[in-house]
Image (tube, helix red, strand yellow):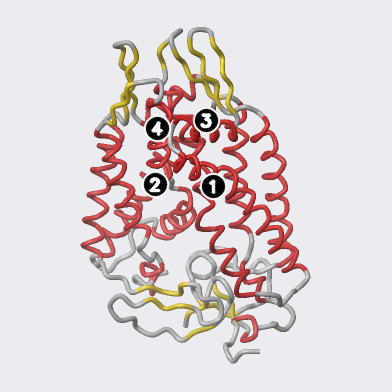
Amino acid sequence: MLICAYCDTVYRRRPLAMGEVARCQRCNAELERHQRLGADALLALVFTALIVFVQANIWPIVTLGLNGRQVSTTLWGVILVTWRDHSLVVAMLVASTLFFFPLFRMLLLGWLLLYSRRRRRAPGFRHAMLALHYLRPWTMSEVFVLGALVSIVKAHVYFDVTPEAGIYAYAALMLLITLLTGFDLRRLWNLGEERA
Amino acid sequence: MSELPRARELGLVGCRVCGLVCQDIFSLEAACPRCGARLGRSMAASVARTWALLLAAFILYIPANVVPIMRTVSLGDVDDNTILSGVVELWRNGSPGLAVIVFSASIVVPITKFLVLGMLLLSSQAGSGWARLQRALLFRATELVGYWSMLDVFVVALLTALVQFGIFSRVEPLPGVMYFGLTVVLTMLASMSFDPRLIWDGGESDD
C-alpha cells in the first residue's frame, strides 16, 4: 500500500512502467515515479558528482580585475572572508548549504548504494537514511549558480570580470545533484527488511 | 465525499519520513517501526509550531528589509544597499531581467510564503473545505520555490570575497543580510512543520 504524504489518501501500489508517474487523484501530488536508474548507474553518478564537487571547490569561481590588480575566489574563500568580516551567519549558511550538506548527501548516498548493489543494508543504514531525508531540502548549489551570475552582472559595471572554471564545474554539479535528488530514497528501505 | 479512502478513516497512518504504512494506535509517542520517526499526528502541534516559526520569520523579515545588507566602499565613498535598493541598482545598470529574478526571490517569494502559510493555517484551523485542491497546490509551490530566496545571501557573500581592492574598492556584508538569511531558514522550517494533510481534514469538501 501507499499513502499520499500530502493528503492521506490510501492507494494500492502497482508497478510503474517506464517513464510513468503515479499521481494522487485527490490532490494531484506525485506519489511515485518510475526509477529509470539502477544502483550501478546511480553509484556512477555519485562518483561523478564527487569529482565535480572537488573541482568546483578547488578551482576559482570568478576573477575580478581593477587597475591591473586581480582578485579571484573559491567557495572556501567566500566562507573564510565572510567569517573574518564577522558575518558568522552568512559564513555558516554558505558553508552548510553549499559545502557540508551536499558533500554529506553524496557520501551517504554512495555508502548506501555500495551495499544496496549486494542487496544489503549498509552499516548505520537507518541513521544515514534519516540524515538524507532531513538534509534534502538544504542543498542550494543551484541557487549559488544563479547568485554567481547575479554577482558577475553586478560587478561588471565597475570591474573586469572573468568567469573561471569553478563556475562551470558548479553548473555541472547543479545538474548532477538534481539527478541524484530525483532518486526516490524510499526504494532503499525495502532492502533486507527482515533484519530491521 | 469522494470514494477515495483516507488513511485516517481506515485507522492507518503513513510515516512522513520513510512512507511505511502503519496501524494507527492514536498515540503521540508512536514511532515508525522501520525508521523510528514519530508517527503521531497532532493538528495542534503542527499548527502551533508553524505559527511560531512563521511569526519569528516575519519579525526578522522587517530588519532584513530596513537594515542595509551590503556596503560598498570605494576611495572613501561609502554606499549602503538594502535588498530593494540593490534590486533597483541592478535594474538601472545591470540587467532588468536579473533584477526581476532577484526581486522575485528576495521579496515576492518570502511575502507570498507568509501570506500562503498564514492562509493555510487559518483555513486548516477552521476545518474549511474551501478550494482544497488549490490550497494543496499552493502549499507544494511554496515548498518548491522557498529556498531560492537564499539568492541575495549568496550574492552578498560572493561580492564580499571578490571585491577586495583595499582603499580602491571593498564590499562588506551588513547585518541586514544576516536577518534575511535567518528569515529564509525560518520560513523553510515553517513550511516543513506544516502538515499538508490538515488541508484535507475536517468538514465536507465544497468540490
> Disc 2 to disc 3, how far (Cα)?
24 Å
Instruction: Give the label on residue B89, or none.
Output: 3
Q: Which badge, 3 or 1, comes first in the chain's sequence? A: 3
Structural crowding at the residue carrying mark 4, measured as other residues with C-alpha within 10 Å and reported as few (<14), some (14–19) or many (≥20): some
Name which residue lies at 59% across and 92% down. Answer: B3
> Disc 3 to disc 1, how far (Cα)?
15 Å
Mark 1, chain letter? B
Of residues A84 and B170, the one nearer the viewer is: B170
Q: Secondary structure at mark 2?
A: helix
Q: Which numbered disc, 4 or 2, marks the residue closer to the eye?
A: 4
Name which residue lies at 32% across and 25% down. Answer: A161
Instruction: Give the label on residue B104, or none.
Output: 1
Structural crowding at the residue carrying mark 2, measured as other residues with C-alpha within 10 Å and reported as few (<14), some (14–19) or many (≥20): many
For residue B40, what is the image quadrant?
Answer: bottom right
Q: Amino acid at mark 1?
A: Ser
Of residues A85 and B114, the one nearer the viewer is: B114
Q: Is the same chain shared between marks 3 and 1?
A: yes
Instruction: Give the label on residue A142, or none.
Output: 2
Q: Which residue is mark 4?
A: A153
Mark 4, chain letter? A
